[in-house]
Image (cartoon, rainbow, N blue to C red):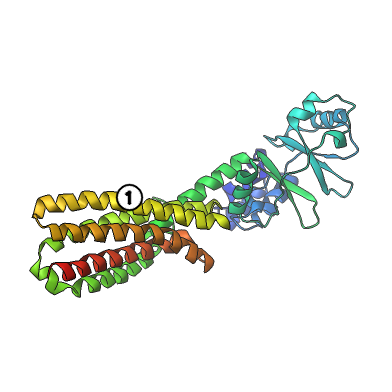
Amino acid sequence: MIGHLDSDDASFLLSDLEEDRRARILTKVSATDRAAIESALAFDEESAGRLMQRAFVAAPVFWNVGQAIDHMRSVSEDDLPENFFEIYIVDPAFRLQGSVPVSLLLRSTRDKPLKDIMKEVKATVRPEMDQEEVAYIFRQYNLASTPVVDDAGRLTGMITIDDVVDVIQEEAQEDILALSGVSEAGVNQSVFSAVRARIPWLAVNLVTAFLASTVVSLFAPTIDQHVALAFLMPVVAGLGGNAGSQALAVSVRAIAERDLEGPLIRRAIRRESLTAIINGLVIATLASLVVLAWFQDPRLSVVILIAMASTFTWAGLIGILAPLTIRRLGLDPAVASSVFVLTSIDLMGFFVFLGLASLMLV
């Protein structure tokens, strides 16, 4: 069965097996297939070398259309990739010269030289390139497939869109899990592995929660005099946290998709800031009206209006600035942003709300 799979699929299946079991399976496949699979397994797990198919169609630059078609018909079915969208044109040293889409090949006359119809390759990748970078190239150039070349520009394989779709799904899932403070996914994890993966960020959360509690404790006398403040603190912190989480999710995804680069950063900061201000004013106004009707205290209504508007504005700003700063430090924004963003929002919300209450209500 392994011998009938493309090399990238075969290496994916074998990568999780123990070394001795993998070796036993490889002894049962042909020497050619074994060499291709072992070559794939030699690359890092999340590299282009693992995604790359060793089976591809290449033709010399001096061939014509008829020769290319006859060649594909003459070779064994197992020597052709299961799916391919173009054939690659190479020189005598096997350096990539261009490509010819299969649809164009079939529409051309048999005597047409391949060099006359070949297209310039939009992008190439190296085997050691990270798979996330490969996915970005596919999105950027709207590719169905792309060739893989070595340092000398020699053709070594190709990557097709079906493999890249899997990468995009994996990276999106990793970002979602990282935002939740979970570094490893899977319902099949052992209890020990799950605890080890999750407890570090829970411990950080514990520290930051005590920081927020410290801010609240500074205003204990004010809370003692106005018990309504205790009822409203979760409203300020909860809604501010939700606003920050929304801005953070949008920012982390934009960073992952390379949509926050150069001049786009300033535009994104303006957009998130304006969005946060408008949302803050709308929600804060509604909250102040509810507080006014509930407690019949105009001063308390003004306090929550200002506090929530300020917290929403800060949430929008920190939700985009934190992941950008963390990326500049060389860390993964998806992993490190969530804890610090939510903590800073809690600190800001409690400090402004209770600080204003101390000034206006006492």
Please identify the quadrant where the N terminus is shown. Answer: top right
| 304 or 120, nearer to the observer | 304
Q: Which residue is mark 1?
A: 279
Left or right of 25? Residue 283 is left
Q: Of helix, strand and loop, which one carries label 1?
A: helix
Give how far across and how far down residue 222 sits, in percent.
Answer: 13, 71
Q: Quadrant of residue 225?
A: bottom left
| 225 or 20, nearer to the observer | 225
Please identify the quadrant where the C terminus is shown. Answer: bottom left
Q: Which three-letter amino acid code belongs to the residue tagged 1?
A: Asn
| 270 or 163, nearer to the observer | 270
The residue shown at (77%, 29%) is: 104
Give how far across and how far down residue 67 sits, in percent.
Answer: 87, 31
The residue shown at (63%, 50%) is: 134
Q: Quadrant of residue 115?
A: top right
The residue shown at (45%, 62%) is: 321
Left or right of 103? Residue 272 is left
